[in-house]
Image: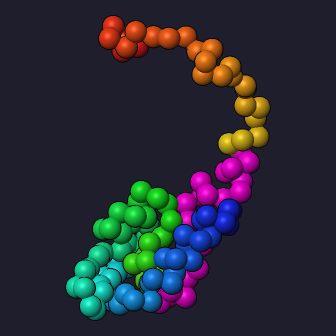
Amino acid sequence: MSGPILGKRLDKETHLSGEWLRTWSSGDLWQVHHPYNGLEFVVDLGKKTCTCCFWDLVGIPCRHDVSALQYQNLDPEKYVDPCYMREAYKACYENNVSPINGMDMWLTVDAENLLPP
């Protein structure tokens, strides 16, 4: 895993996953519900989706996903999107980033007459 922020977020979701109860449906589908507030979500581990949309948007398993993963003794870290891995950061930033002038030297543009490219 890469970075302390990702680790903290996954740790938080792992901690909160204990509040959720999961029921296997079929294949990779799970029904996950909270016994006190009545919220329910559908988790598809194969597609890496949850109806709360957190996993889809952020790429880190949410508490509902972690609940289903842990029931099967699967490591949630292995389900984190590859964009968070060290290799992805390295590939993204291994090339030189060209410097630019400060904002005070940028050209001013008349926003009123600005046309799309």
- Residue 16 is situated, as x and y percent measured from the top left of the image, at 45, 83
Magenta-colored span: 70-91
Mostly what secondary structure, the magenta segment? Answer: helix
Could you tell me if residue 25 is visible in this image? Answer: no
Residue 38 location, quadrant: bottom left
Instruction: Write the residue at 25% across / 80% down.
Output: 39
Per the image, is 88 magenta?
A: yes
Q: Where is residue 55 in the image (x, y as percent from the top left)?
A: 43, 64
Residue name at image x 55 percent, y 88 percent: 73
> Hey, which residue is sitting farthest front in the picture?
104
Image side of residue 49 versus residue 11, left or right: left
Query: Which residue: 68% across, 20% down?
Result: 101
Quadrant housing the C terminus = top left
User: In the depicted view, which residue is nearer to us: 66 or 35?
Assistant: 35
Residue 43 placement, left or right of 12:
left
Give the side of residue 100 with respect to residue 34, left or right.
right
Residue at 57 percent across and 77 percent down: it is 11
Q: Is residue 53 visible?
A: yes
Number of labels in the image equals 0
Which quadrant would residue 22 be assigned to in this image?
Answer: bottom left
Coordinates of residue 26 in the picture (x, y in percent): 33, 82
Residue 33 position (above or below residue 2): below
Foreground residue among 114 and 42: 114
Estimate the x, y position of residue 61 in percent, counting from the top left. Answer: 48, 70
